[in-house]
Amino acid sequence: MSDNIHALIIDPNKDFCDPNGALYVPGSEKDIERGVKFLRKILHKIDDIHCTIDMHHNLDISHPLYWMNSKGEHPPIQSPPYIITLDDVKNKKWFPTIRGYKDAFGTIDEWTLYYFEQLEKKYGKTQHMIFNPHCLIGSDGVQIVPELFEVLCEWENKYKGFVDYVVKGTNFKCEHFSGLMAEVPDPHDMTTQLNKSLINTLKVADKILMVILEAETHCVRATVMDIINNFSEDEIKKLILFEDTTSRIPGCEQLAEDFRKEAISKGMQITRTTDY
């Protein structure tokens, strides 16, 4: 009996994988090239494909427009990303540009403080990164790179399956690195909370091939660790990360190094497309 093989692709958006993209990850176009070649080779063996797609509003907690200081200035766009801290929020060095906004949670200022306090409680970190506006809803940059989309359509046409496209990031109040849940879930928005359906679907796989993954420092790290944290010890061994189809955001490389060390220690496998 053949293995039940799932492929997991993380954020192959043009804004990440095209050198002209708004948040281009250096080396990602080569990841696409190698990953597409590999997928074409094993397409007939794949039983299910899951593909996360990053998608944001321009006004987003991780974009400059969300924030301003007392001079009316927005945080700078830079590499590595600009950092806003819990103390910055408490001391109102940076605060939300939206005034008068209120939803089921409360005011935007109450949410923002809660968000940073939860970052500290959940991850032990008091920092939040500000990125160049990217993968904006309706923009060209939010699209999947064409050469990969062609392969995904080919798989659907030949094998009469459907790619499980997982959209993340549309709640402007939450950073949503992971394809499984937001960094700090909004208690009033199910799309930011743990995607139990995807977890349960992945659990039935015999192998999970993680190929074409951007960027390892952020969305890959968060997605894979959320899977690991919801898998048993034996289930984690199903995870295979292809290191020649993922790249890192410059200046944040240590995040990827720490992720690999932790994930491998828990049972995740790492290989290359040329060795599989």
Image (cartoon, grey):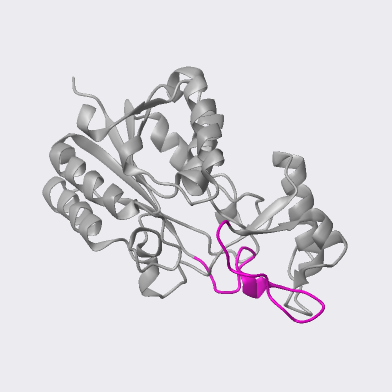
Quadrant containing the N terminus is top left
55 up-or-down from 2: above or below: below
The residue sitting at 47% across, 71% down in the picture is: 136
Q: Nearer the viewer, residue 139 or 253?
A: 253
85 up-or-down from 34: above or below: below
Residue 148: image quadrant is bottom left
The residue sitting at 54% across, 37% down in the picture is: 226
Q: Is residue 242 visible?
A: yes
Quadrant containing the C terminus is top left
Q: Nearer the viewer, residue 132 or 231?
A: 132
In the shown orientation, is residue 69 left or right of residue 6? right
The percent coordinates of residue 185 (x first, y second) are 65, 51
Does the magenta run of residues contain 250? no
The percent coordinates of residue 81 (x first, y second) are 59, 58
Q: Nearer the viewer, residue 191 or 90?
A: 90
The percent coordinates of residue 126 (x first, y second) are 75, 48
The percent coordinates of residue 12 (x first, y second) are 35, 55
Would you say the magenta stretch is mainly helix, strand or loop?
loop
Does the magenta run of residues contain 61? yes
168 up-or-down from 195: above or below: below
In the shown orientation, is residue 265 left or right of residue 127? left
In the shown orientation, is residue 149 left or right of residue 251? left
- Range of the magenta residues? 56-80
In the shown orientation, is residue 272 left or right of residue 137? left
For this orientation, the residue located farthest to the left is: 158
